[in-house]
Each structure stands twice: as structure tokens, then as C-alpha cells.
Image: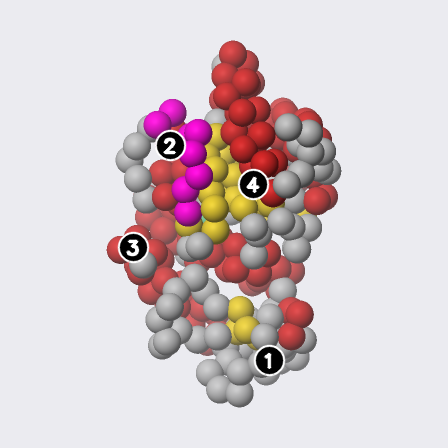
Amino acid sequence: MSMSDSAARDQAIQHLRRLEAEGVWGVRRSEPAKQEVKLATNDSDLQTFSSPTAGGQSPSGESLTLETLAAAARDCQLCRLCEERTNVVWGVGNPDARLMFIGEGPGRDEDIQGEPFVGAAGRLLNKIIEAMGLRREDVYIANTVKCRPPHNRNPAEDELAACRPYLMQQVDLVSPEMIVVLGRVAMQAILATDAPLGRMRGRVHEWNGIPVICTYHPAYLLRTPEDKGKTWADMQAVMQQLGIGQQ
Ligand code: SF4
């Protein structure tokens, strides 16, 4: 486990304990369910949560699902991005998706509609997904931060850290076979690197045991259409890895 994942793990534990104290959902410390969802860690001290498929419930009778977690995040004030948001933009798509896309953070359209990738960049992402032989509803789409940074600035380190437990929970619950990270900011946050995107794309990385491919953010591709071919090459690698579509 890298230092960054260890730190994220600790943040996730603290964050979930806070949520538990607030009665948002229960954390099971005993009587583990038949199937369990663990945060991405090997730490035996980490609490386990009953998964939706195991029919797990909190003491309040609330099942732990992406919807439950989204509800928990709805009033989140863990970082300053809560101050100017209209909506917490949780995530969208198939909760059992084989493929998950992770972008940077909500923009103006996403903030208003409460759904990731719904503006012009979202429409381009939809086209990319469809070119892969998939539909938007086949995949799961989320961002590294769930609230819009003012004036579309990049999220700050502490904001990414505050929101990272939510992303980890989403990844754990969706459990995709592959993750596509969109753009430099998300790539650097997830892979804990300062390397430029151009050096990281074109090969398969790994995050908590899940293969990761990095490619250009659709918003960048709208400004730099000459790089669309590179993203398509990246998506062909994803298709090959998942055994889907035409090569
Ligand atoms: S960005 Fe994430 S951590 Fe920050 S307020 Fe929004 S949901 Fe909470």
C-alpha cells in the first residue's frame, strides 16, 4: 500500500466514523455478513461493511448502496467546495459496471443538474463511450471531487483528500474491472504522481488492484481535437482489455 493510499485509508476510516456518529449509516464491527465490501486496504483494523448484494443493513435498517452513500454525501461540508455548490454531483451509471470513468470535478452544467459529464464535455464522453460499443448507462461515471470548484479552478490538494474516501467507496461498491481516468488532475490525484498525462497515458497502471488507463479529459479534447486520436487509441486498449467492440 502506498503512502497516499494509506493516508486515504485513514481519512476514509475517520470520515466513516464521523458519518456513523452522525447516524448516517451503521458500521459493522462484528457479525460480518456473508459478503463484505472493504475499503481498499489490507489493514485488518479496518471496519467492514455489508454489501448491497449481501442485503446488509445499518442499525437504522438502511442498506449500504451507492444511493445510500450519495445521500450521505448530499449535505457534506468536509471541504470548502461545499460553500458555492448547487448540488453534490455524486456519480451516475450502472452500479455493476465493468468500466468506470473518473474525471476531475463538476463544471457549471454538472453543478446545476447534479450529474457528472452532462455539458459539452459530457456529450463528447458519451460519443466516446458509444464508439466503444457501449452506452452511457453501461458504465459508471464519477469525479475525484463531488462539488464544483469555483470558476472551474482545479481542486486543491486538501479538497481532493477530503473527497477521496467517497471515491474509494464508489470504486469499492462498483468494483469495476477497469478504470479510465480522464485528465491530468484526476490522474495525478489517483495515481499519486506529478508526471504529465502525456507520459502516463498509453500503458496500463494499477490502483488498488484495478487496471487503470489515463487519457485526455473530454474538455481538453474539445479544445485540442488533434489529440482525439490518442484518446481513441487509449480506448482501444480498454476495449482489448475488456474484450469488447471491434479492434
Ligand atoms: S467536494 Fe467532496 S468532501 Fe468537499 S464538500 Fe463536496 S462532497 Fe464533501
Q: Earlier in the sequence, mark 2 or mark 3?
A: 3
> Which residue carries the number 3 mark?
2
The amino acid on which the numbered mark 4 sits, given as a three-letter code, is Gln
> Which residue carries the number 4 mark?
241
Look at the numbered disc 4 and give the secondary structure of its residue: helix
**Nearer the observer, 142 or 33:** 33
Residue 142's disc number: none
Please say if the residues under marks 3 and 1 sit with CB atoms less than 8 Å apart: no
Please say if the residues under marks 3 and 4 sit with CB atoms less than 8 Å apart: no
Residue 242 image point, x, y percent: 60, 43
The amino acid on which the numbered mark 2 sits, given as a three-letter code, is Met
The residue located at (64%, 60%) in the rendering is 67
Instruction: Tell me the CA gap for discs 3 and 1.
Output: 29 Å
Q: Which scheme is used to colour this image of the protein?
A: secondary structure
Q: Is residue 178 magenta?
A: no
Instruction: Tell me the CA gap for discs 1 and 2.
Output: 39 Å
User: Does residue 37 appear anywhere in the picture?
Assistant: yes
**The magenta stretch spans which residues?**
198-206
> Which residue carries the number 2 mark?
200
| Pointer 2 local density, CA inside 10 Å: few below 14, some 14–19, many at least 20 | some
The residue located at (64%, 41%) in the rendering is 243
Q: Is 118 left, or right, of 234 in this rendering?
A: right
Q: Residue furthest top?
A: 226
Residue 14 image point, x, y percent: 37, 68
Look at the numbered disc 1 and give the secondary structure of its residue: loop
Instruction: Tell me the CA gap for discs 2 and 4.
Output: 17 Å
> Which residue carries the number 1 mark?
34
Please say if the residues under marks 2 and 3 sit with CB atoms less than 8 Å apart: no
The residue located at (45%, 65%) in the rendering is 39
* Quarter of the N terminus within the rendering: bottom left
